[in-house]
Image: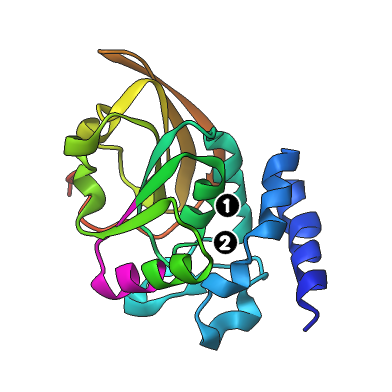
Amino acid sequence: MNIEQARFNMIEQQIRPWDVLDPAVLSLLTVVKREDFVPAAYRSLAFVDTEVPLPAGQCMLAPRVEARMLQEINVHKHERVLEVGAGSGYMAALLAHRAQHVTTLEIVPELAQLAAANLKRAAVLNAAVRQGDGSRGLPAEAPFDAIVLSGSVAEVPQPLLEQLRRGGRLIAIVGDEPVMRARLYKRIDDASWSQDDLFDTVAPRLRNFPQPERFSF
């Protein structure tokens, strides 16, 4: 496989057609080597439009979904970012290139170790992996400028929204199959947030987030 040609095709055929047009994001996708964050057994899938299996039954999101979320959260160099769901560490690496510092939470110990090792190997120095339950965020270290949920939730818990600073953003994939939407929340002031639905997609659930009870008839 010609890796650079495969990367080019991924960007031009999958990512750009999904309205990822920010030149800085597109350039970053050539700098951060996605194949270095993919388990060796699945490296042939690194640039394919699909989720890539990870240990413990988890997966990397499809490249176009990661790229679109990165574009929409619009992180700046002075900002502190919290990610929930480190996975292989790839999204944390992308965010770290745009942020001052990234803290990424991973509930699965094996994945936390994998993400930390991948970030170290890629010489990403401003991202830290913490093993733990990300559904509560990191209230002791809040507020954050941006929060990224790298997976889906039925709804975003209010305590996470409250960990945004005023003007801060949170992006998540919200809803239930077969209809989920990437949604961007912005904190307006101490008591109010705006929200915008960005695009439809489907993603695996993040663990331990509340699931509303369903009525049964």
Q: Residue 65 carries which label?
A: 1
Q: How crowded is mark 1: few (under 14 residues within 10 Å), some or many (20 or more)?
A: many
Asked whether the viewer can see residue 214, the reply is no
Residue 4, position in %: x, y? 79, 71
Query: Which residue is found at the position 20% from the left and 58% from the top?
Result: 132
Q: Position of residue 31 (x, y in %)?
A: 68, 58
Residue 25 is left or right of residue 65, and the answer is right
Q: Is residue 112 magenta?
A: yes
Q: Which of 134 and 155 is in front in this view?
A: 134
Q: Is the C-beta separation of discs 2 and 1 under 8 Å?
A: yes
Q: Give the range drawn in magenta.
A: 104-115
- Of 91 and 157, nearer the camera is 91
Q: Is residue 85 magenta?
A: no
Mark 2 element type: loop
Numbered marks: total:
2
Percent position (x, y) of residue 150? 42, 52
Whether residue 162 sits left or right of residue 120 in the image: it is left
Point 61% across, 67% down: residue: 34
Q: Is residue 134 left or right of residue 31?
A: left
**Residue 121 tag number:** none
Crowd class of label 2 (few under 14; some 14 to 19; many from 20; radius 10 Å): some
Query: Looking at numbered disc 1 in the image, what kind of residue is underneath it?
Result: Val
Q: Distance between the residues labelled 2 and 1?
A: 5 Å
Quarter of the picture containing the N terminus is: bottom right
Vertical placement of residue 115 versus 199, above or below: below
Q: In which quarter of the image is residue 8?
A: bottom right
Question: Residue 119 vs residue 72: left or right?
Answer: left
Which amino acid does the dot numbered 2 rest on? Ala
Tell me the tag on residue 62. 2
